[in-house]
Amino acid sequence: MKRITIIVSSAVLLCSCNWFSNRHYVPSSQIPEDTIDVYLVGGQSNADGRVFSQYPDFVKNKKVDSVYVWERKQKEFGTYQLGPGSEYLSGSDVKNSNAFSFDIIALKQLQRKENKNIYIIKRTKGNTSVAAKTPGTTGSWHYPVSDTMSKPILLEEFKKEIQDCVEQLAAHKKTVRFKALLWHQGEGDYQPPFDAQYFENTKAIFEQIRLYSGNQNLPIILGSISHKSAQFSGVVEASQKKLAETDSNIHLIDLSNETLQDPYHFDYNAIMNFGNKVYAVLKDIK
């Protein structure tokens, strides 16, 4: 998922020019806030976004006003935008990124409540795992990093985006304050023996992201896996519950009864429910 002005990967020069001319791109020097609240988003396909059949009412002309996503190559923020060819504008790793996910549902509500801009750094990719390598996956969040891991190495990419954002804004005398991590990951680790490793693997990843953020108590909002998913694992679900039970700053969102549009991915109603539940937690984070 990437996007500039936006988030992760930048597009071709021609597209960049269109972004600039349409004022999607926001140079760091022109960000009005001195202290910028940034929300981190990570995980696999259900965090990446797979819903595109209909949009919530705040999506206007495929854009979401006052919500900005980091783009790793341009090293700037830009307006959240959907549409084919806009994978760099929505944080999505999907090239036909009309699709959106729970994060924008939660964060747009927060933007409206607080009446200020929302900034996001998002790294998500479908078909990935928290284990170093699982059958059929194409990417890993595992920590520590090793040469035998499935590529891409997502935690390293996320770390670089976070560091680049902090450095770029510091160059303009602005401070970044990381407010929370929104996370959905677990389907890729549903098989033994990887399901039994999920707790320790995810705990290590969360510790690293907190380290990168400079906040050892960074709130983490973690969504569970629907019981209707072909990749549901009771072992993974138990591990997610244990993560929340052993860390008061990890909030587990129960998605066990949510509906799917295919064997793996949340449908529109599920994404809306997920986003609303995340917002209910976010609005009380100071």
Image (spheres, helix red, strand yellow):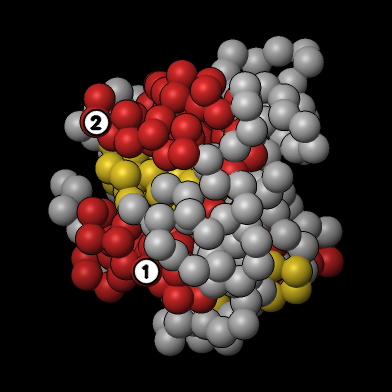
Label 2 residue SS: helix
Q: Residues within 10 Å of mark 2 (few under 14, many from 20)?
A: few
Mark 2 sits on what residue?
245
**In the image, is residue 225 above or below residue 52?**
above
Mark seen at residue 7 = none
Residue to which mark 1 is pinned: 273
On the rendered structure, is 256 left or right of 191?
Answer: left
Query: Compared with residue 213, is residue 264 higher up or lower down, i.e. above or below?
Result: below
Q: Is 201 positioned to the left or the right of 223 in the image? A: right
Circle 1 crowding by C-alpha within 10 Å: few under 14, some 14–19, many from 20? some
In x, y percent, where is residue 159?
Answer: 55, 29
On screen, residue 160 above or below 222: above
| Of residues 188 and 50, the one drawn nearer to the viewer in this rendering | 188
Say which quarter of the image contains residue 111. Answer: bottom left
Within the image, what quadrant is residue 82 found in?
bottom right
Number of callouts = 2
Q: Position of residue 148 (x, y in %)?
A: 78, 15
Q: Residue at x 82, y 60 (%)?
A: 13
The location of residue 83, given as percent across then percent down, is 69, 75
Most foreground residue, 77 or 215: 215
Q: Residue at x 51, y 75 (%)?
A: 268
